Each structure stands twice: as C-alpha cells, then as structure tokens.
Amino acid sequence: MTNKNDEQDVAFGFRRVGEGEKQGLVNEVFSKVAERYDQMNDLMSGGLHRLWKDDFVAMLNPPRGQAGFNHLDVAGGTGDIAFRILRAGGPNVRVTVADISPEMVDEGRKRAETEGLLGRCNFTVGNAEALAFPDRSFDGYTIAFGIRNVTHIDKALAEAHRVLKPGGRFLCLEFSQVDVPLMDKIYDTYSFTVVPAIGKVVTGDGHPYRYLVESIRTFPKQDDFKAMIEDAGFANVSYRNLTGGVVAIHSGWRI
C-alpha cells in the first residue's frame, strides 16, 4: 500500500503512516520520555529489564584483559547497555553509542560524566539505517529495545553487517512473542492498560507508551526476525527467549 505521495506505508504502532513520517513520530515519542526513560523501564517491567540487559551483555562477553575491543551500541541513548559493557570488559574496551534522539543522547552523556565513564564512551546522534562509520569498524554491535522503532529494519540490519569487522558479533535484545499459554493474555492486558496508565502518571502523557506497546505487537516474531538477520548476511544466527518470550536475544556473526 502507498500513500498519496507514493511513499510506502509503514507501521507506527497500529497506525499506518508514510515512511517519511515515521522517524519524526518516533523521535517525538522519545523526546517526551527521555528524562524518565530508565525510570519507566523499571516501572513497566518490574525491574526485569535490568536482568535482561545483564544476560545480554553476558552473551556479548567483552574481553576482560588488555585486548582492545571497539563496540557500537545503537539506539542506546541513555547508556544503559554501554555502561554494562564497559564494566564487564577490560580497560581497553571502548563503546560508541549512536541514537537518533538528541534528547536521549544528552541524557546518556550526562550519566556517563556522572559515573566517570565519558573517557571510554562516545555519544553520537545517528540513524541506525545510515550509520556514519566506515566499513568494518567495530568488533561488536548491540541494539536493545530499539530496532522495532526504525523505519526499515532490513536497512538497519544491513548497516550492522557493514560496520562489523569479520568475526564481529551482532546482538539484538527486543520485545518478542510470548510463547506460554495464558501468559500471553495476561501480558496483553497488562501492556495495554497498566503501561499507558503508569506512563501518564510518571510523565504526564500515556500516548508515547501506548505506541511503545503497539510497536511490540507489530514487530516480527522470533523466527521471522531470525530470517531477516540471515538475509542481511549474518551467519550462525540464533535466538534465546527470556521470560517466556516477552523478550528475545538474537545473535549473529559476520564471517
């Protein structure tokens, strides 16, 4: 389907919008929630997002010795993943954070300065679909709870493959398809009623959180996303469900 300007329509939550509109709408969502994004993650997940992120970084397993490791974390504006990687790895691990939201990047940079990590962590405003880095620049690439917000997932995956060195690892942590009977119905009820209500209380606006919930439901299922990663050129692609499939970690390697 196309709109009146002959643009391809894409999903923005449960709505269809022109592909040229989506990124601006996503940016607006995150500009509204940037200052309280991590607080909202705690409230929405009951703190589980911290355990999921710990598992995610454990799978990355950055080198703990003196080896250099140049890592890219995409859509990681507030630094939550980047800081975990730096603490898990050795002194020569470096992380570049690229996020399309200037407000999220500002929050991350302030946190990094407060925690004394700014010297090993660089924050940039950048689009996952068109990264401003040379080919084969990074040893690792992570994206957590961000890829479902890009306009063209296939382009973001192709860019991930492009900027990784041969032998580099791609890891994606994303909300996914619950695979436990009855749990899926409880999860739906919680997502569409409790989460927007919490968002309204904490930030004064529940609409951004309704979009975030809707975007989870329109994201490809685990096996479909695995196939997309393979189509982008990655090898040995696999995934692991956490909390009954509420989230999944997808892994792939550039060979």
Image (cartoon, rainbow, N blue to C red):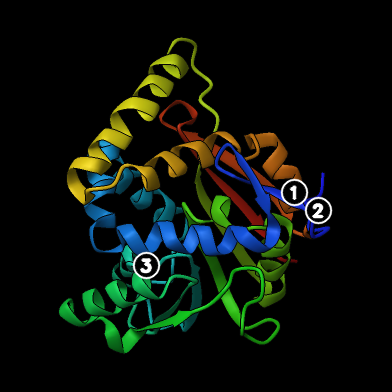
Q: Mark 1 and mark 2: span between their CA atoms?
A: 5 Å
Q: Residue at x 55, y 29 (%)?
A: 177
Q: Quarter of the image containing the N terminus?
A: top right
**In-front residue for pair 126/49:** 126
**In-front residue for pair 19/85:** 19
Q: Kindly identify which residue carries mark 3.
A: 85
Asked if 17 appears above or below 70 in the picture, the reply is above
Q: Kindly identify which residue carries mark 2.
A: 231
Asked if 141 appears above or below 249 in the picture, the reply is below
Q: Mark 2 and mark 3: span between their CA atoms?
A: 28 Å
Asked if 38 appears above or below 110 in the picture, the reply is above
Q: Which mark is residue 228?
A: 1
Please tell me whether mark 2 sits on a helix, a strand or a loop.
helix
Q: Residue at x 40, y 30 (%)?
A: 243
Q: Residue at x 21, y 82 (%)?
A: 113
The mark nearer the N terminus, 2 or 3, is: 3
How far from the left and from the top, in percent, is residue 23?
Answer: 57, 63
Residue that sits furthest to the front in the current view: 4
Label 2 environment density (alpha carbons within 10 Å; few <14, some 14–19, many ≥20): few
Q: Are marks 1 and 2 in contact (CB under 8 Å)?
A: yes
The answer to whether residue 152 is visible is no
* Mark closer to the observer (2, 3): 2
**In-front residue for pair 173/184:** 184
Q: Quarter of the image containing the C terminus?
A: bottom right
Does residue 59 appear left or right of residue 65 in this picture? Answer: right
Q: Amino acid at mark 1?
A: Met
